[in-house]
Image: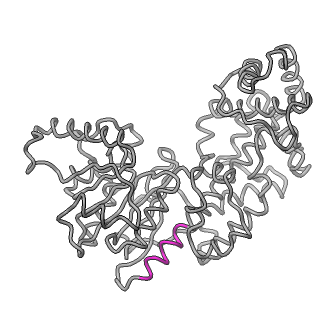
Amino acid sequence: MLDTRTPLPLPSKYSNDTPEQYLERLMSFYKEYHWLIHVLAFNFVTQKEWEKFPLEWREALMERIEDAGDDWTIAILDLTSVKSDYSIWPESLRTYLETVRDLALPRDVDEATLQQQRNISKHILGGMSDKKIHEVKFMSQLIKDVADERGITSVIDLGSGQGYLSRALAFDYGLEVLAVDMSEIQTQGAVRFDKKALKSQGIKEEDEEQQPSLKHVTEKITPENIAQVLAKWSPESSDDKKWLVTGLHTCGDLSPMIFNLFAQSKEVSCVVNVGCCYNALTTSGFPMSDYLKEKKDLIKVGSTARVLSCHSPSRWVDEGEQCIKAFDNYYFRALLQEMLVERNLSDINDPPRLGRIKQNKEFVPFVKASLKRLKLPDDTITPEEAELHYLESKKKQVDKQFVTLWTLRGLLAPIVESIILVDRWLYLRDAAQQSHDERKGAFMYPLFDLSASPRNVVFVASK
């Protein structure tokens, strides 16, 4: 099944690169636009971020906005579309737009993958959204295929949550599944869904012979304790028994933990994983590869960049006005910071932390809620002052400048994500190469429909 795949599908323009050469290109572009990646919304006005763009960019973009009239938001969001005509822009801006489009890892699912899909049983659909059904359908089928190729019948599902993937593997594909989550609440919820699935099949709880081999446990598995955990929950497991470890949209450092289990544990011979929530990564989860660790002093992918990598600009055109409204709180925060600095209530380089403020459609209620959060008197900024400041900023087209910069910045999200993904692939490749098995190897490719599931890249490795 994997024999016909390219281990690491690169963008067509860079298909002749080695993985390391491609990663160098990503890092070079990252460093060139390091300033834009690390723009913080609340500093937009006070740090004059808009003026950091080349003059010809600013003039061309504002001219496009003016020509678009009331449809200016559509015109700006069109920058994120792969179908957008970049030839209308100045050469330097066109180069930027084409590079972010051409350099990021390909994310479209190939037709062969789409045609191989199998439906999952109706009795295990409880609790699943359409998005989750799509993901579980493709993920469970892939795991079954990999397990069959390697003669594996036992799976560890880490970060199993409500057990959606685990049930598909056990109920539909007959695999032995140990579903592991660190939350007892999630474990209990998964057990309830199991009972409903059994009931819908007419299987009684006491009829153990008819039940799939599925156990939900609340544990934390590490390379150091995996043998003890397996002995505890799968006592019939022998030293020769091999496991496939998996996880669907494992958050933050959990994906690196899964990869470490694959690399360091003799009990695990295969891994199938789709990660998410790069914003929750720590230094123990990135970088992973020796190649990037050696360069970590040359390139910093900090928390701001990792948060950006979670964005999905390819969906912004479809979201349209809803997407722009989501920008409003960022824009409001920038205006508030300007007003606080003017009143000597905030250091220009060290703004106060607001935390989450309920999304407001209007600036005045946002200011009121923010002052309350900051424990400042209501009259620190009067409603009249807030309204006047907002209107003046609109007159200066600061809102349009902000949306434009935020959109151009968002285009860098797939670049940052590509760095994280290639780093993980290099780690798995090196781990697999330590094995003498002919079937060893590491693969990475899009598995889910990007429009349905933005974090759609799966890792498959065997040793």
Q: Where 176 falls versus 269 (above or below)?
A: above
Residue at 71% over, 25% down:
373
Residue at 77% over, 36% down:
352
User: Majority secondary structure of the magenta segment?
Assistant: helix
| Furthest-bottom residue in this view | 436
Q: Nearer the viewer, residue 411 or 76?
A: 411
The location of residue 190, given as percent across then percent down, is 30, 41
| 26 horizontally vs 94: left or right | left
Residue 420, by quadrant, is bottom right
Residue at 22% over, 55% down:
173
Q: Nearer the viewer, residue 3 or 252?
A: 252
Q: Where 334 falls versus 51 (above or below)?
A: above
Q: Quadrant of the N terminus?
A: bottom left
The location of residue 336, given as percent across then percent down, is 81, 29
Q: Where 58 falls versus 298 (above or below)?
A: above
Q: Quadrant of the C terminus?
A: bottom left
The location of residue 74, given as percent across then percent down, is 70, 35
Q: Is residue 427 magenta?
A: yes
Residue at 45% over, 51% down:
249
| 337 horizontally vs 354: left or right | right
Stretch in magenta:
424-434
The location of residue 331, given as percent across then percent down, is 76, 33
| 425 horizontally vs 321: left or right | left
Count the labels in the image: 0
Q: Where 265 falls versus 74 (above or below)?
A: below
Q: Nearer the viewer, residue 234 or 248?
A: 234
The colour scheme used here is one colour
Residue 5, by quadrant, is bottom left
Q: Is residue 436 magenta?
A: no
